[in-house]
Image (cartoon, rainbow, N blue to C red):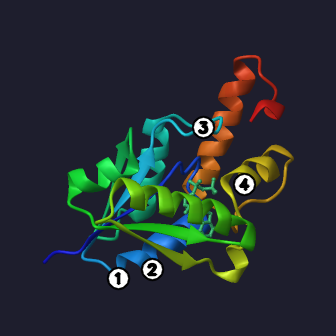
Amino acid sequence: MRRVAIYPGSFDPIHCGHIDIAQRAAKLFDHLVVGVYDRPSKRLLFSTEERVALARKAFGSISNIEVRAYSGLTTAFADSLGARVLVRGLRVVSDFELEYQMALTNNQLAPHIETICLMTRKEYAFLTASIVKEIFMLGGNVSTIVPVYVHDALIAKRDQLRSLGNTAGSL
Ligand code: ADP
């Protein structure tokens, strides 16, 4: 049987911590679908289309990774793809409570779907998309934590916001 897993998240934007988890998960399954959730409760910088495009650039060379946007329940998305595993990344201890809560909730909704968590690499243990945006906004170097095309997208987004009259502080 073809083993399909999904790796859901907001990926706003995708960074090296996400990429590392997806690359490692892709070695464990026949097919990995990176699911870009279209409406997380977080305030987004990039549109769904932009987040999907950046994620596709990240995984273009890996034949068993596919990137798709989704809305609604993550378990319904998994079912629609025939996926029986939901992959998540675990960073510091503070992630555990939320991941545990989500795994239990998803298990209630869909007992046939398992959540597995992969531990982050230590160099990405404190890396979040919010931190990427904050470092960038403050003029810091993000070249070791995002691919070059994400860096370019951050510059373009900042320029776009500035031209609309927003300050970089609104990132
Ligand atoms: P972020 O927390 O960076 O905003 P998401 O909310 O999109 O990212 O998270 C999607 C998944 O990726 C979650 O399971 C999250 O724990 C995982 N993840 C995010 N950052 C990292 C990282 N630095 N190392 C490992 N996993 C991560």
Mark 1 → mark 4, Cα distance in angstroms: 28 Å
Disc 4 within 8 angstroms of ligand 1 (CB): yes
Tag 4 residue: 132
Res 66 seen here: yes
- Dots 1 and 3: beta carbons under 8 Å? no
Q: Earlier in the sequence, mark 4 or mark 2?
A: 2
Q: Earlier in the sequence, mark 1 or mark 4?
A: 1
Mark 3 → mark 2, Cα distance in angstroms: 27 Å
* Residue 171 position within the rendered picture, expressed as x and y whole percent measured from the top left: 74, 36
Q: Where on the image, by quarter, is ligand 1?
A: bottom right
| Front of the two marks 1 and 4 | 1
- Dots 4 and 2: beta carbons under 8 Å? no
| Front of the two marks 4 and 2 | 2
Is residue 171 or residue 3 the one in the foreground? 3
* Residue 44 position within the rendered picture, expressed as x and y whole percent measured from the top left: 61, 36
- Which quadrant would residue 64 be assigned to in this image? bottom left
Q: Earlier in the sequence, mark 1 or mark 3?
A: 1
Q: Residue furthest top?
A: 165
Mark 2 neighbour class, 10 Å CA radius: few under 14, some 14 to 19, many 20 or more: few
Tag 1 residue: 28
Disc 2 within 8 angstroms of ligand 1 (CB): no
Tag 3 residue: 41
Mark 1 → mark 2, Cα distance in angstroms: 7 Å
Task: Say what secondary structure mark 3 lies in.
Answer: loop
Task: Say what secondary structure mark 1 lies in.
Answer: loop
Quadrant assignment for the N terminus: bottom left
Identify the mark at residue 24; answer none if there is no mark: 2
Task: Say what secondary structure mark 2 lies in.
Answer: helix
Question: Which residue is found at the position 28% from the left and 66% from the top?
Answer: 112
Res 147 seen here: no
* Residue 158 position within the rendered picture, expressed as x and y whole percent measured from the top left: 71, 35
